[in-house]
Image (cartoon, rainbow, N blue to C red):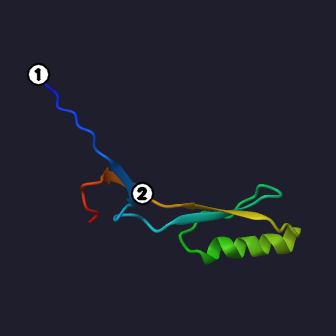
Amino acid sequence: MKKILRHVEWTLGPDPERDPPARYVACKECAQRSPVSTVRANPDQWALEHSGQTRHRRYRECVAVDLVTRPSHEEAP
């Protein structure tokens, strides 16, 4: 039995069947974080409320986006 192997370049990009990006905001001062949401305003509102309650002012935004790999010779749908 023979195997034929060839070098193929691959690409990484957005998945055309992806869900909307999911995000949350984490407080860098106390490590609390907002619930994960696909609506941008929800984590933003959480951070503003958290700041008002705690006077914490530094946050990190974490975003998850679905990606897909494919051989570079294949066109994205």
Asked if residue 2 lies left or right of residue 62, the reply is left
According to the picture, the residue beneath numbered tag 1 turns out to be: 1
Q: Quadrant of the C terminus?
A: bottom left
Indicate which disc residue 30 carries.
Answer: none
Measure how far apart labels 2 and 1 are at the Cα level: 35 Å
Amino acid type, residue under disc 2 in the picture: Leu
Asked if residue 45 lies left or right of residue 64, the reply is right
Asked if residue 47 is positioned above or below residue 8 in the image, the reply reads below
How many marks do you count on the picture? 2
Q: Residue at x 24, y 55 (%)?
A: 73
Q: Residue at x 54, y 64 (%)?
A: 22
Q: Nearer the viewer, residue 61 or 76?
A: 76
Amino acid type, residue under disc 1 in the picture: Met
Q: Secondary structure at mark 2?
A: strand
Q: Residue furthest right?
A: 55
Q: Position of residue 70 (x, y in %)?
A: 31, 52
Pointer 2 with pointer 1, Cβ within 8 A: no
Q: Nearer the viewer, residue 14 or 29?
A: 14
Q: Position of residue 76 (x, y in %)?
A: 29, 63
According to the picture, the residue beneath numbered tag 2 turns out to be: 67
Q: Residue furthest left?
A: 1
Q: Position of residue 24 (x, y in %)?
A: 63, 64
Q: Quadrant of the N terminus?
A: top left
Q: Secondary structure at mark 1?
A: loop
> What is the quadrant of residue 42 in the picture?
bottom right
Q: Residue at x 74, y 71 (%)?
A: 47
